[in-house]
Image: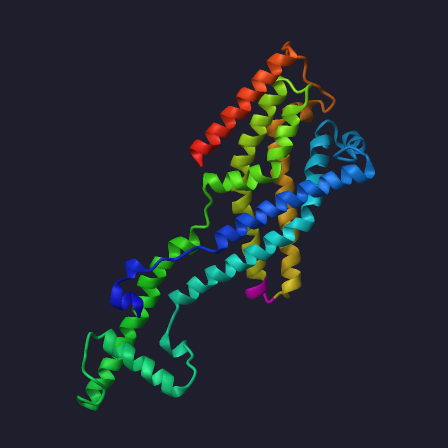
Amino acid sequence: MFAKRHGRERLAFIPLHTPLLIVAWILAFCMYGEGVLAFLLVTGSTFPPNSEGWVAAFGPFGFMLDYALSNAVFFLPALFLVVRAQEEAHEIRRSLQQLRAFTLDGAHCHSPADRAAILSLISRWWTESDVEEGDGADEDDAQRMQLGCERFERFVRYELARSVAPAVEGGSIGVGDLFAIIVCPFYTYALDLLATPEAGVYHVVTILMFVAMSLAGTRALWAASGAVASVGSALRERAGWPASASRLVVIVGLTLTVAAFYLVLLTVAFPAAVLDYTFRFPDDGLSAFGRKCLKFSVVAGAHAAAFAVV
């Protein structure tokens, strides 16, 4: 009714499922990092823990395969947050489909009297008539009622749904969202690595490469997780699977997706680990003071670039 009186352009739609997914991924990455840290502190071992066996079985690539699968396992508890957020996002998208198939016959009212009053108001507003019910012939009232209801249904199915669609179907994330997902969990970790006195030029370049690949890969991870969640929703709604079974499929799919994400990310960012996981960067020839100056410039420049982009 507001759109009829004041114009459809005054309606504002906020895609609440997008920030919900962003927060879920931020918490997932943070829980993953805390899980790895707790494992290292409790066991006193290295990460990944079974590298020697994987290398013996699969060669040099076994180290990266073990690393990717280990990351996915530590991600598993946090993926329940992502699954729940994806389910909420699916419910919002399904509401859009219901708008596109809206009919007044399928709408429910509190009582028959309420329904008659609402339909009467719709018929007057959507036929642009100020004539009160009963002032004209009964057949004119019936025609006006039918015409007004048909116009209202077309408005909801086409104009209103078209206005809602960009907010619901967009589901995209901007650069600022990517920074929030990646930087929040790994910010202090990256600074800690850079602060290590032994970290030289090669380490700085590798960390920058890792951050850049993470930003690009997270967008792909976002899209892939949405596709996996859609499969789970289809199994539940179309195939009649129980909710628990469909969620299990989604969790397994997301675990494999995260494993693939880390496998590609780490292989591109750290190619030496694939060819020879025992490789160590050579000395860069800089003094301790020179390394500090380099790291300060890199960190200051990275912060300036982040503020400029975000």
**Observer-nearest of 94 and 236:** 94
Q: Judge whether residue 237 is colored magenta.
A: yes
Q: Position of residue 48 (x, y in %)?
A: 75, 35
* Residue drawn at the location 59% of the way across and 57% of the way down: 84
The image position of residue 57, as x and y in percent, is 78, 32
- Where residue 178 appears, as percent x and y from the top left, is 51, 40
Residue 161 in the image: above or below residue 178: below
User: Foreground: 220 or 231?
Assistant: 220
Residue 39, magenta (yes or no): no
When the figure is inspected, residue 177 is found, relative to residue 270, above or below; the finding is below
| Quadrant (top left, top right, bottom left, bottom right) of the C terminus | top left
Residue 267 percent coordinates (x, y) = 63, 30
- Pick the quarter of the image with the N terminus: bottom left
**Residue 30 shown left or right of residue 51 in the figure:** left
* 249 lies above or below 133: above
Q: Quadrant of residue 244?
A: bottom right
Q: Quadrant of residue 47?
A: top right
Q: Residue at x 26, y 62 (%)?
A: 7
Q: Residue at left 43%, top 54%?
A: 169
Q: What is the magenta range?
A: 236-240
* Count of numbered circles on the image: 0
When the figure is inspected, residue 121 is found, relative to residue 243, above or below; the finding is below
Residue 310 visible in the picture: yes
In this view of the protein, can residue 231 be seen by the observer? no
Predominant secondary structure, magenta span: loop
| Color scheme of the displayed model | rainbow
User: Residue at coordinates 29% horizontally, 74% vertically from top-left?
Assistant: 150
